[in-house]
Every structure is written in structure tokens, then in C-alpha cells.
Image (tube, rainbow, N blue to C red):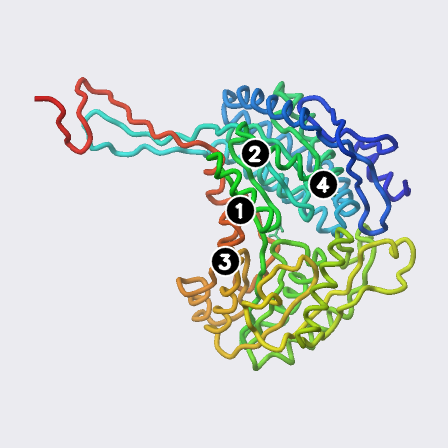
Amino acid sequence: LSSRASTILHALDIHSETELEGVYDGDWTGSGEILESVCPTTGEVLARVKSATPAEVERALERSREAYKVLRTVPAPKRGEILRQIREALSAKRDDLGALISLEMGKIRTEGEGEVQEFVDIADYGVGLSRMMNGRVVSSERPGHSILEVPNPLGVVAVLSAFNFPVAVYGWNLALSLAAGNATLWKPAPSTPLCSIAVTKIVSSVLEKNGVPGAAAGLVTGGKAVGEAVVGSSDVDMVSFTGSEAVGREVGKVVQGRFGKVLLELGGNNAAVVMPDADLNMAVPAVFFGAVGTAGQRCTSTRRLYLQSSIVQKFLSRLEGLYQSVRPGDPLDRSTLLGPLHTRAAVNIYHDAVDHLLKTGAEILTGGAPYKDLPAPLNGGNFVMPTIAIPQEVNVKDRVWSTETFAPVLTVGVFDELEQAIEWNNGVPQGLSSSLWTRDIRNVGKWIGPAGSDAGIVNVNVGTSGAEIGAAFGGNKSTGWGRESGGDAWKQYVRWSACTLNFSDEAPLAQGVQFSN
Ligand code: UN1
């Protein structure tokens, strides 16, 4: 192992000289198919991880259920106190864990650390929430009666997370699920097992210190078969899935088919709309970050740019300048802004998208090619040039506009009236994030109102990506309608009990119904 990698792994107590166990159910096990963790920057194999066998998944599910039975009786503020300790433990490892995210996923250092920060933030939120998961008292129409709406723990929540946020999205789910009194079972993306092992080690040591069964935050690494076993199991009360539309559609059907709860966080195809009165000193760097940050691999990345006709040249020449200044580099190096794509397969998807753009007559303003002659070890990495393309027309039904390409490819369209841009913004199947740049309050009113953006995230003078944890995060339409993180998202992680209590000596029926002569 390179010294660059081994320093990071050792700091997190991961010793990859031997095969690692990728299952945690209170004990570390794992004897299934081997997953390889490959560094996307260099191609180096970081570790080999033994994933879960069907029997190990079964056992993890059983132990999760037992852990739930313990957790549900722990008062919520006490669960919050455990979450506070998890927050402290994560915060102490912020740099190391951030570096591991950069090493294994490929995002740059500040974003890796930002991801750990996002987990810390949502843990803080969960601590507060643990004293505020309030139900309601409802007025009864009957004398001497009271109606309560009580949030009770739900059971076992399975979290299937994606490679692009290998730590934070699990954090969103764990914080709410634990505060709510559930056991959480994590099935991470098969290509980021080390992030999940490192996080699980940190979390489980806190659980153990508090006498809570480790299976309250279990882990089953694996591929499709492990995912299917978890999703299909009637021992899982809610499945929180982040990933592609294609897989999400199947997950949704399976979970609905067994009447489980499902929370879907699927593809985004996010547009930024720039009006002529926008402050370009803000808008240009924000579009640059939205489209090129994380090498275009956020669900919230900016994929479509709609420019008002009078500012097209000015905007694009400045944006192109930023694109041309960006150099690929090791994401662990603090000066790097552009890391690799996560996998080789993603490089092919990028090329495929560029080919299609060229074939359909789009102008490639910048990018559109792999980097040649990168020095070793970066020549073993998945680097591609961030690309700006101007298709011949905006036809939102066309693949160029309607599909999510998980790579730094930005397509540009030109409009005259805001209404046209909103129609394009809304004309695609997905509905995750959107962003309007303007100083005119009338535009803002249109954008956030009933005839405005139909996405779940509707920003003004803020880019499409990089949401804080405080508001509910999620998208509409084919993004799956799920909400995670802040806002009212926690309400999905409980079962609601409507309790009508009679304190009187009569037993009147509702609606005045009489059932005696
Ligand atoms: C994702 O891309 O899956 O808003 C999540 C953002 C981050 C989360 C993205 N806070 O870009």
C-alpha cells in the first residue's frame, strides 16, 4: 500500500494488510464475496473486504430487531445523549475521516471534511430533536375525551447509500433514526466499504460504551444480492434508498409490495437559471462550483444552465475562464479543485454523453476529452475534463436534457423570458434542485410560487448543490419524493399512534351515532 493511503487508514484503525471484515452486527464478521476498494485517483487497490453472506444478512437483521427492542425503551433524550457522544467522536476524527473520503471516493479534501461536518451537524440536530419529537393533543368532540398523536419508534431502518456521499447521507439517516428509537442497518455502496467500516467503528464504540447493543447501528457491505436481501426483508420497517432512478424504481416496488415504508432519493437533473440582472460575481463561481465541484458527482450538481439571451456571451466567457483554469489533481492535495470520477464505468458514461452531444450537433465550448499525459500516479486515475456544451436547441424531451449524466457535463440553453426558463426547468422527469439568479423580487416570487420551480430545492442566488442540513432535503417526481435530513423529515422515522382516551363515565360514539334502543 502506498504510504499516502496507509497513513490515512491506520489513523482510522483500519489495517488492510489482511482481508477486512465488512459486517457488523454487534460483532465484526463477514465471509462473503470480496469487495475491492479501489482509489479512483491512482487505481491502487486500498483493501479487500469480505462482504455479507445471505446467512450473515439474516443474522444482522435479527440482531437489529433485538437492538430495536432495547432502544425503543431508552428515553429519547438519553438516545440524544448517545448521539451527542457520536457527534464528539466523529468531530475528533474529522480530518482523518475527511481524508479517507477523499482517498476512497475521490472528492477533494475540503469536501471530504465537509461531509464529516454534515454528519456532525445532523447529529447536533438529532440531539436537539431527541427533546422535541413532539406529538399533539387534539380536541375531541366528545366530553371527557382526549386525543393524542404519539410518535413511537418504528423498528429497523435500512439505509442504502450511494458512493458519492459515502458518509453524510448515512449520517442524515442514522441521526434521525437513532433519535427516534430505531435500529439502523447500513448497506453502503459496494465501492466505498472503507468509509462505512471506519464510521461504523466510531459509532459502535460509542454505543458499546453506553451499554447499547452494537446492532443499533449495524453494517452489511455487499453488492446487489445483499441489497436485495435487505430491501425484500419484512424485518425491515423502512428502507431509505439513495441511488439511481432505475434501481430506485425496483426498490420502491419491492418495498411497497410488502407494505413497508420507503424513502427514495434518486437522480437529480438540476438547472441554474440566470436573469440579466443577476450579480455575475456571485452567479459565475456558483455555477462553476455546482457543475465542476465533486467532479459533477452530487445528486444536486448543476447539469443544465439556462441563460437569458442578453448575458450569454458575458456569462460564458467568464465561466469558460474558470473551467480552463482548473487542473486535475490528487484530491488529498489541498490545492486541488478537480478530483477524479469515482469509477471507470463513470468515465465511460461521460464519454458516451459527450459523443451523443457531438452527434446531435452540440457545440463543445470546453472540455469533452480525457486528460492525456497525466504524471504518475494520476495516470491511473479516472480524470475527465469538465465540459460545457451548447446543444442546437432546448428540447427537454431529448436525452441530452432529460437524463442525469453523473459527470461534469453542463449543457447550456438560451431564453428570453423567465417563464420559458421555468418551463424548461420543470420539463424533465427529475425534480431535485434548482437555482435562480436575479435581484428582482418579482422574479423571485414567480420562481418560488405555484407557477415556479417544481423541484424539492428551490434556491435564489444560491447554487443547486451544497444544502445545509436544517431544511428537509429531497426531490419530487422521478427523484422519488423522499425527504431526509432536517425539516419534518424525522416524522417518517416513527410510527404515529392516534390514541383516543376516555376519562369519563360514559362511552359516547363519535359523530353522535346511537347504537342502542
Ligand atoms: C447527494 O448528492 O446525494 O446538498 C447529497 C448537497 C449536499 C448533499 C448532497 N449537502 O449537495
Image quadrant in which you'd find residue 330: bottom right
Q: Earlier in the sequence, mark 3 or mark 2?
A: 2
Q: Nearer the viewer, mark 3 or mark 2?
A: 2
3D distance between C-alphas at marks 3 and 4: 29 Å
Q: Which residue is mark 3?
A: 455
Mark number, residue 121: none
Q: Residues within 10 Å of mark 1 (few under 14, many from 20)?
A: few
Q: Position of residue 450 (x, y in %)?
A: 39, 62
Mark number, residue 470: 1
3D distance between C-alphas at marks 1 and 4: 29 Å
Q: Is 254 situated left or right of 386 in this image? A: left
Q: Residues within 10 Å of mark 2 (few under 14, many from 20)?
A: some
Which of the image's four quarters has the C terminus?
Answer: top left
Q: Which residue is mark 4?
A: 190
Q: Amino acid at mark 2?
A: Gly
CB of residue at label 1: within 8 Å of ligand 1? Answer: no
Q: Earlier in the sequence, mark 3 or mark 1?
A: 3
Q: Secondary structure at mark 3?
A: loop
Which of the image's four quarters has the N terminus?
Answer: top right
Q: Earlier in the sequence, mark 3 or mark 4?
A: 4
**Relative to 8, is 441 above or below?**
below
3D distance between C-alphas at marks 3 and 1: 18 Å
Q: Earlier in the sequence, mark 4 or mark 2?
A: 4
Q: Which residue is mark 2?
A: 232
Q: Amino acid at mark 1?
A: Gly
Q: Nearer the viewer, mark 3 or mark 1?
A: 3
Of 181 and 444, nearer the camera is 181
3D distance between C-alphas at marks 3 and 2: 30 Å
